[in-house]
Amino acid sequence: MVLWDVFSILGLLCAATYRAPQIYQLYTTKKADDLNAMSYMVQSCAYIFFLMYLIGTGKGTTEFVLCAYYVIGLMQNTLVYKLKQKYKPQRVDTDTNVQAV
């Protein structure tokens, strides 16, 4: 293992944990009012395009660290988006006092 490999492992560790505080907060508070879903969708599209580039150019196997980074980020963004959808505020119909989905 060369020194540069250590940096790639550290980068993957950061990639695997950088959304953890936000995911934890979403899960515990059950509130996602301040999150912008569009930013996660755009970032996820970027990850998908980068993965397509790596696979299309044949670098998917030689650039494992980058592939892993994009896959981890995509999974985390998907989880955040799903939690946001699950915990979005329910609209209440004032006439009937019934929650609308």
Image (cartoon, grey):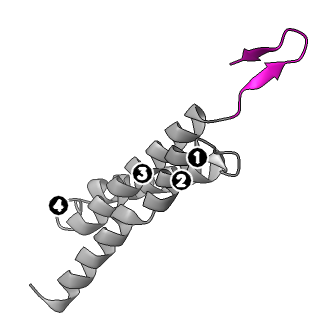
- Give the amino acid at mark 2: Gln
Disc on the earlier residue, 3 or 4? 4
* Residue farthest to the left, as pictured: 1
- Give the amino acid at mark 1: Thr
Which percent across, then down, holds residue 86? Answer: 56, 32
Q: Is residue 36 left or right of residue 94?
A: left
Whether residue 48 is visible here, answered yes or no, is no
CA separation, marks 4 and 1? Answer: 40 Å
Q: Nearer the viewer, mark 2 or mark 3?
A: 2
Quickly name the residue at label 3. 76
Quickly name the residue at label 2. 25
Whether the residues at callouts 1 and 2 have beta carbons within 8 Å, the answer is yes
Which percent across, then down, holds residue 46? Answer: 49, 56
Mark 2 element type: helix
- Magenta residues? 89-101
Quickly name the residue at label 1. 29
Quickly name the residue at label 4. 61
CA separation, marks 2 and 3? Answer: 14 Å
Which quarter of the rendered picture does the N terminus lie within? bottom left
Q: Nearer the viewer, mark 2 or mark 4?
A: 2
- Between 98 and 71, the one lying in front of the other is 98
Whether residue 84 is visible here, answered yes or no, is yes
* Membership of 97 in magenta stretch: yes
Which percent across, then down, holds residue 57? Answer: 28, 60
Disc on the earlier residue, 4 or 1? 1
Which quarter of the rendered picture does the C terminus lie within? top right
- Give the amino acid at mark 4: Thr
Which percent across, then down, holds residue 75? Answer: 38, 48
